Amino acid sequence: MKRFAYLKSFRLRIFLIMFLTGFIATGIMRFGMTANTRNRAIRERSMEVTEQIRICANRMINYGYFHSAPSDIISAQLTQLSLVYEGRILVIDSAFKVISDTYDISLGKTMIGEEVMLCYRGETINNYDRDSRYIEVAVPVMEKDPETGENVILGMILASASTDSIRREADILTRQGFIIELVVLAALIGISALTATLSVRPFERVTKAMAGVVSFEEDIPVVSDYKETGEIVEAFEKLRQRLKVLDESRQEFVSNVSHELKTPIASIKVLADSLNMQEDAPLEMYREFMQDISAEVDRENEIISDLLELVRMEKGASGMHVENININELLEQIIKRLGPLARKSEVDLILESKRNVNADIDEVKMTQAITNIIENGIKYNKHPGWVRILLDADHQYMSISISDSGVGIPESEQAHIFERFYRGDKSHSKEISGTGLGLSITRRTILLHKGSIEVESKPGEGTTFLVKVPLSFIVGE
């Protein structure tokens, strides 16, 4: 395939378009001019022959050609015309007898044909036979009857004229046109090649400028030769900015992951070193330290599990197992599961359903997402406090509103709560367990369901999350 990669060259395509356009245009022009010149010459020759035959017809009347013996002057004139036009001339009388033939072939014969009959009706016939390349002219010879004043047909002149001389001139013109066309095409090749080179040069500068960018910090030089090159540079600059943001996010993510993963390991090492430094440590201390070590291991495992789930979601690797689920029953199960945690924290869980709702969702993922929000409402709440879950739906979307009476989220932090490892209210974060990935996973889950999640909060008054998800999940939208 690489051998034919040059066929995709923009420069080659511009060259071919210009060359073929010029080639076709010059070919059409040459053929058009030749055909037009040939047709015009035939028309002029036809008119000329017709006029000469009419002159002969008038002279025949003047010389009384059809009332007396044939005139040598008329015969000589007919012979001369037949030689000039490389053709044949016949004179036919009113009885359809050939009384004169420049070829002396049909003298005395009766001549009846379509042209003859039309001519005897007073019509002048003028045709061009493309097969034989002859012009055929039939002119009636008429004079007025002195008694009635009407035209009387005395006979007719039937003439044929060769167009070989016209064809020879057309062939000469065609050869000359072909030579001119070759010269034009040679010039067109050079012009097309130059134009194609100049046309793609700005794009080559754009490519070179892009290739010269080795870091996200470098700006690409502006190439404003064309509107299109300017748009390409602008689009590349926007892409560079997005990649810069993604790279910064990646670096921050790696830093956060490293910190979050090191923290439990550091705690485990401190606890283990403390035990190793005490040779006669009591059994109660061993049990307490081992419980702490086990808790740190669980925390490490929870962080790793959440990270893997988030990465799978962002890569789209975790398939969606969509089923039609009763949302009322799903919320009741979540509240039942979180009941012990809520009672321990002195938080009341309140579920209000305005109607029975069924929706196409991935039950496992949606359960995890709603659980994360309610669990945060329990953890960051007052004691005693409450968390209210309100379920509603219209003809297209279901909505789940989760409100709490907790500490609230400052407005400056609301834009960051869905970021990975972000944990608001630093004074409580150390006391409350969690990985800082829950809301990131929740938001990604809602987006996978083609829904939306919004947050409203006032410090000291509480927080409300509003989740909206389509009732029907359409794959590919």
Image (cartoon, rainbow, N blue to C red):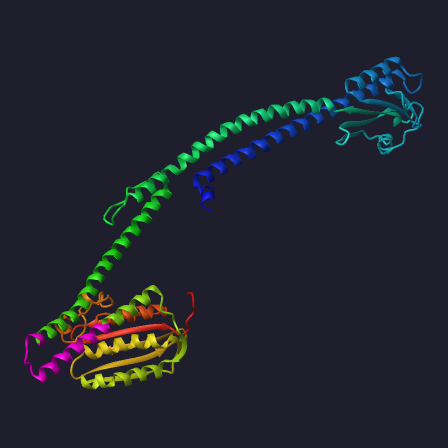
Give 86 or 220, whichever is nearer the viewer.
220
**Residues in magenta?**
275-302
Give 463 or 198, whichever is nearer the viewer.
198
Residue placed furthest toward the top:
73
Residue at screen point 30% across, 76% down? 368
Residue placed furthest toward the front:
279
Give 320 or 138, whichever is nearer the viewer.
320
Question: Would you place residue 250 above or below residue 199 in this image?
Answer: below
Q: Position of residue 370 (x, y in %)?
A: 29, 76
Relative to 266, is 102 on the left or the right? right
Residue 406 seen from this side: no
Question: Would you place residue 207 above or below residue 351 in this image?
Answer: above
Q: Position of residue 148 (x, y in %)?
A: 90, 27
Instruction: State yes or no: residue 432 in magenta.
Output: no
Q: Quadrant of residue 29?
A: top right
Q: Quadrant of the C terminus?
A: bottom left
Residue 211 seen from this side: yes
Question: Would you place residue 416 above or below residue 16 in this image?
Answer: below
Q: Position of residue 226 (x, y in %)?
A: 37, 40
Residue at screen point 42% across, 65% down? 476
Q: Quadrant of residue 72?
A: top right
Instruction: State yes or no: residue 292 in magenta.
Output: yes
Majority SS type along the magenta span:
helix
Q: Position of residue 360 (x, y in %)?
A: 40, 75
